[in-house]
Image (spheres, coloured by chain):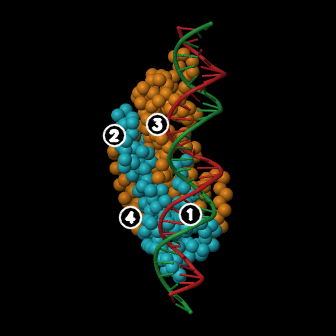
Chain colours: A cyan, B orange, C green, D red
Amino acid sequence: MLRIGKLTDYGLVVLNQLALAGAMKQSTDDIAQATGLSIATVRKVMKAIVDAGLVIAQRGAKGGYRIALAPNQISVLDVVQAFEGPISLTECSADDNHCEITESCSLASNWTGINDLLLRVLGGITLDDIRNPDVQDKLHHDIIDQFQRIQLVNL
Amino acid sequence: MLRIGKLTDYGLVVLNQLALAGAMKQSTDDIAQATGLSIATVRKVMKAIVDAGLVIAQRGAKGGYRIALAPNQISVLDVVQAFEGPISLTECSADDNHCEITESCSLASNWTGINDLLLRVLGGITLDDIRNPDVQDKLHHDIIDQFQRIQLVNL
DNA sequence: TTAATCAATACCAAACTGGTATTGATTGCT
DNA sequence: AGCAATCAATACCAGTTTGGTATTGATTAA
């Protein structure tokens, strides 16, 4: 399925909410209510995006969360990596590469290439793009156009 | 991690081997030996790519497998889908979409867009590209170039 | 008929995932 | 100082997925 976890999805939803709130600090409760997620789940989500530096947390009474960067400075890649760690499609393209069939398999470097490509795609889409349908549509079509050209090259 | 399963990786390795063998039928044993995979694992791999129509199987004595299409007609996407089913990054972008927080989440359509994008990337890379380092390098650089342009648009 | 070969399942352990709960540390307020 | 609000760190658990293997059955060439 090549899918990302639900938590990652939630992360984007929460970030969207925080972007909406701007400088206004949001407590776990606030976020849970605004997003419809359970409090426990929100806590788990917050940990990941705080650790990743995408959100700033303030403890204690009157504490809460606020977004750490402008929405156009946060890429989908940032969010995905916050939850799923460094992206590597296969173990071949992971850092600690020790595949038993490496000798008979000349494909490792290629996975790495594909991997890089996906990183670029995800890194090129920001929270802003996702939040604003217009911008998103525009960007989307641009990329599709480019890709159709690429596919011709590929034949 | 956003990763694909090992089986998918094996699938690509096996297809590469079959592409090499061309019209010469390969038995499960042959493939296991050539790739270094266990026989049992090869069997599992074969089922997926046969079901997907990427490989043709012939049963009985003197039977075996041969590749069903030219290597430039098989995309990485084909292989990934053969093993991991239809690609959908999130449940939002899946067919049977029934997310509890849909009302408060305006992001569903955007995941779908990102999803489409990844499909295109993977669909644009063929087994041939992966097997031939030269072609692959060339293609790779083309795509990277294109993407750098896209990222500028995105700022 | 027989041996070679693919097909279909079934099984199991290990890892991962989503979801929840518990306890502890920090901070503003009075 | 003490309290209440709030985030942090873990720990737990059930369900699913994944990787790997084994077993039995169906097909076919010679």
Q: CA distance from mark 2 to mark 4?
A: 29 Å
| Residue D21 at x, y percent in the picture | 52, 30
Q: What residue did someone put label 1 on?
A: A10
Residue at (43% x, 60% y) in the render: A123
- Chain letter belonging to callout 3: B
Is the same chain shared between marks 2 and 1?
A: no
From the viewer's perspective, is residue A129 above or below residue B132? below
Q: What residue did someone put label 3 on?
A: B10
Q: Are marks 2 and 4 in contact (CB under 8 Å)?
A: no
Label placed on residue A125? none
Q: Are marks 4 and 1 in contact (CB under 8 Å)?
A: no
Element marked by disc 3: helix
Q: How dense is the environment of label 4, judged by Cα within 10 Å: few (below 14), some, or many (20 and up)?
A: few
Identify the amino acid type marked 3: Tyr
| Residue B138 at x, y percent in the picture | 34, 45
Can residue A148 be seen in this snapshot?
A: no
Identify the amino acid type marked 4: Leu
Of badges 2 and 1, nearer the viewer stands 1
Residue at (57% x, 44% y) in the render: B85
> Considering depth in this image, is D12 or C19 the residue closer to the camera?
D12
Q: What residue did someone put label 2 on?
A: B133
Is the same chain shared between marks 2 and 4?
A: yes
Q: Are marks 2 and 3 in contact (CB under 8 Å)?
A: no
Q: CA distance from mark 4 to mark 1?
A: 28 Å
Q: What residue did someone put label 4 on?
A: B152
| Residue B122 at x, y percent in the picture | 47, 47
- Chain letter belonging to callout 4: B
From the viewer's perspective, is residue A149 above or below residue A61? above
Can residue B146 be seen in this snapshot?
A: yes
